[in-house]
Image (spheres, helix red, strand yellow):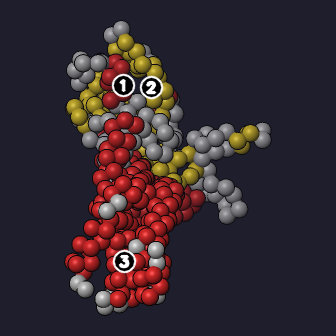
Amino acid sequence: MDLLAIIRIAMRALGRNKMRSILTMLGIMIGVGAVIAMLGVGQGARQTVQEQIQAMGSNLLFVGAGTVTRSGMHMGWGSTKSLIYDDMLAIMRECPTAHAAAPGSSSSGQVVFGNDNWATRVNGTEPQYFDIRVWPFQEGSAFTQNDVEMAANVAVIGETVRKNLFGATNSIGQTIRINNLPFRVVGVLVPKGTSAAMGDDQDDIILVPITTLQKKITGQNWLRWIMVSAVSRQASYAAQQQIAALLRDRHRIRPAEDDDFFVRNLADMADVADEAGRVMTLLLASIAGVSLIVGGIGIMNIMLVSVTERTREIGVRMAVGATERDVQQQFLTEAVVLSLLGGGIGILFGLSASYLITKTLGWPVLVSPVVIVIAVLFSMAVGVFFGFYPASRAAQLDPIEALRYE
């Protein structure tokens, strides 16, 4: 018996009890839909976290001032004063895996424009910082190296600061006051959103030349951090070791002593986040997969009932020449058709659920074609696995006993 004939007979058999077939498929529909939606949620979350980390910079290494202990108290990161501008120059000169570097220090300040004011972070750096952070401008441009050398009162502002100070007013060329010092706004950065590392608003910031911050706001001549961009992601691990060794040597730290700085690699953060996202995705898919197993058990149950109800039919088929293999194929095909029909409708259910999750909850959902293919194959496997026993049981019936069955 050819496959098309078997499928036609299976469809007719399932059509005799439409409601029972629909209820049987329901478990597979829910299972496949739940798996697609949950995998979409997990993959969407992973992609969002990776995009947030990538938005922080290109192959980024963060070198920060370390901690000191005073009277038994750890003062926290940034409390040492040993990280200086010459360290950044040495990194660029002696670390071949470092592509670019930007110095940085920070403060906080009350910013005023007209009748509006806003408390925000004020960071001092150099123009290459914006390239290292891969941070383009929506208006204006960065301050120049000449502004750094002249300690000019110019500022680049983030989107959060722009909205709270200027609203719909054009901000470029306007004068703001930071701690009573006038600064001319030369650029507005493209919004980056919340930081994946710290959870803070990256757009709530003002950037000024490092010399301006040190000479006119903080009065400090040391750095709180250095941003370093490695030549590639793979090279960032070597760069991390080279920078640590260089700074220990420059700061004359003995082998048994702790570092007075720290080096963080965003590649490590991305790997940890990706692994956490993978675990979450597998957990969500496993929970949703339970409903697929329940649906498969439902198929087995209904197929066993069908074998019992059609015992006499099976006997007639065998009496007119059907082999055990033909009977087994017939019932196995019915189980696979049930699961595939349920899986097909389940795919539509999963895509609809993903759309609703995105629209109502605002969660990012990413459904890839691979997930849909896997869902179809898995639903087919469920039909084969849970339909095999009823099909084998039907094939093993004694034809004479089957004909006598009432």
Which element type, helix, strand or loop, lies under badge 1? helix
Using the rendered image of the protein, determine whether residue 60 is visible from the camera's viewpoint: no
Quadrant in which residue 377 is drawn: bottom left
Q: Nearer the viewer, residue 9 or 166?
A: 9
Disc 2 crowd, CA 10 A, few/some/many (<14, 14-19, 20+): some
* Three-letter amino acid code of the residue under disc 3: Glu
Residue at figure coordinates x 30%, y 71% from the top left? 10
Which residue is the site of mark 3? 313
Total count of labels: 3
* Three-letter amino acid code of the residue under disc 1: Val
Q: Do the residues under discs 1 and 3 have CB atoms within 8 angstroms?
A: no
**Which residue, as the protein is rendered here, is positioned at the far top?**
115
Which residue is the site of mark 1? 161
Residue at figure coordinates x 67%, y 39% from the top left? 75
Among the two numbered marks 3 and 2 on one chain, the one whose residue lies closer to the N terminus = 2
* Three-letter amino acid code of the residue under disc 2: Thr
Q: Is residue 217 above or below residue 362?
A: above
- Distance (Cα) linking label 3 and label 2: 81 Å
Residue 244 horizontal/vertical position (percent): 54, 60
Q: Is residue 170 left or right of residue 193?
A: left
Residue 34 horizontal/vertical position (percent): 42, 53
Q: Is residue 187 above or below residue 322?
A: above
Which quarter of the figure is the N terminus placed in? bottom left
For residue 120, the mark is 2
Which element type, helix, strand or loop, lies under badge 2? strand
Residue 140 horizontal/vertical position (percent): 21, 32
Q: Nearer the viewer, residue 113 or 31?
A: 31
